[in-house]
Amino acid sequence: MDVSDRSVVVDNIGRLITNDPGQGDGATGELHDAWVVMTDGLVTAIGTGRSPATDSRIDAAGRCALPGFVDSHSHLVFGGQRADEFAARMAGRAYEAGGIRTTVAATRAATDEQLLASATALLAEARRAGTTTIEIKSGYGLDAIDEARTLRIAKGLTDETTFLGAHVVPPEFDGRTDDYVALVCGEMLAACAPHARWIDAFCETGAFDADQSRAVLTAGRDAGLGMRLHANQLGHGPGVALAVELGCASADHCTYLDDDDVAALAGGNTVATFLPATDFSTRQPYPDARRLLDAGGVAALATNCNPGSSYTTSMAFCIALAVRDMRMTIDEAIWAATAGGAAALRRDDIGRLMPGTRADLTLLDTANPIDFVYRPGVPLVAATIVAGSVVAGRIA
């Protein structure tokens, strides 16, 4: 094998999950006693047995390796925190979307430096937990200036940025939701589109109805942005049907799905992105992922990291909840947290390990990924590799 002097091999992998059925066993393309060659940030070869000679070597020491987690839904750029709100909810108060306004006030008051420092710390935390790709939404500025600056900050951390001006209606537009939607579709979109890949809206009681969400999404689409949608979080509603109708890449939350929603998702090209840490934090029921998967739908898992309803960066925690409470198998949950997240971002260069994909790997301090559920809460990530470089953890 002709190997560049910039190539690295990760070998002595006890169990390698590739998510490429053509390379290994089962739907996850599993290999044993495996190795991965990485060159110039890409996977260039995968095999089993004796590894090829390369410029450098990482000994996995029998550990399990899998594609890096793809967290396709987060809100990392924000000011303040809402621990008191969480404590009140744990004492019995119901979750309400209006709590977002607390974070809007704190975000508007924060400096760029404060917002960047906080988001950078959360990104580092996510890296330590095995996440190699993360999407970051705006939505805590809710005016043209603050939405644009939070997106500029987010774009310095990830290529996957989402304009979520239609998160909730800010206080200064109380009673004038349509006027606010016009602002989102006009001046705010113009300020934010250069910093965003996606547009999103919160289609929910207490936020925006189907017509308002449609107006926001189609305005974003006309400005060249991809579409995603918060849908069916707090109850049954029109969000999922709207997302599928418009061809959104992802419908996120999907806590409440009726038969028509399941059929629409199974028959369309919209990924259902489940956010089980949110249901944990808000004491909502967990989605029935089994029902969707059995119907042929595609699922992703994401953290929804934000200060109000899901203050975690742990994809492992989401996997544990998905298996324990959403009736997913461990293989389905890992696929949803890797290849599923990539599908929700319409990416084919991440979420899988095969020649030509980005060399993003998560190495575990275990030989068996069932430990995400069997040993919940235990830090299992030994090292996180992004584009061929170890960015968190270490391999002794």
Image: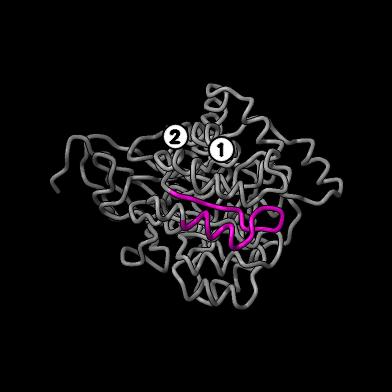
* Image quadrant assignment for residue 208: bottom right
Which amino acid lies under the numbered mark 2 shown in the image of this protein? Answer: Leu
Residue 378, image x, y percentages: 62, 43
Say which label, 1 or 2, has the lower sequence index. 1
As drawn, is 311 to the left or to the right of 136? right
Give the crowd class for mark 2: few <14, some 14-19, many >=20 residues within 10 Å.
Answer: some
* Image quadrant assignment for residue 389: top left
Asked if residue 201 is among those painted magenta in the image, a careful observer would answer yes
In the image, 107 versus 308, the foreground residue is 107
Compared with 332, 310 (above or below) is above
Residue 108, image x, y percentages: 62, 29
In the picture of the structure, the residue carrying the numbered disc 2 is: 157
Residue 361, image x, y percentages: 40, 45
* Image quadrant assignment for residue 294: bottom right
Compared with 108, 92 (above or below) is below
As drawn, is 265 to the left or to the right of 61? right
Residue 97, image x, y percentages: 71, 49
The disc at residue 76 is 1
Q: Badges 1 and 2: C-beta atoms under 8 Å apart?
A: yes
In the image, 76 versus 286, the foreground residue is 76
What stretch of residues is rendered in magenta?
198-218
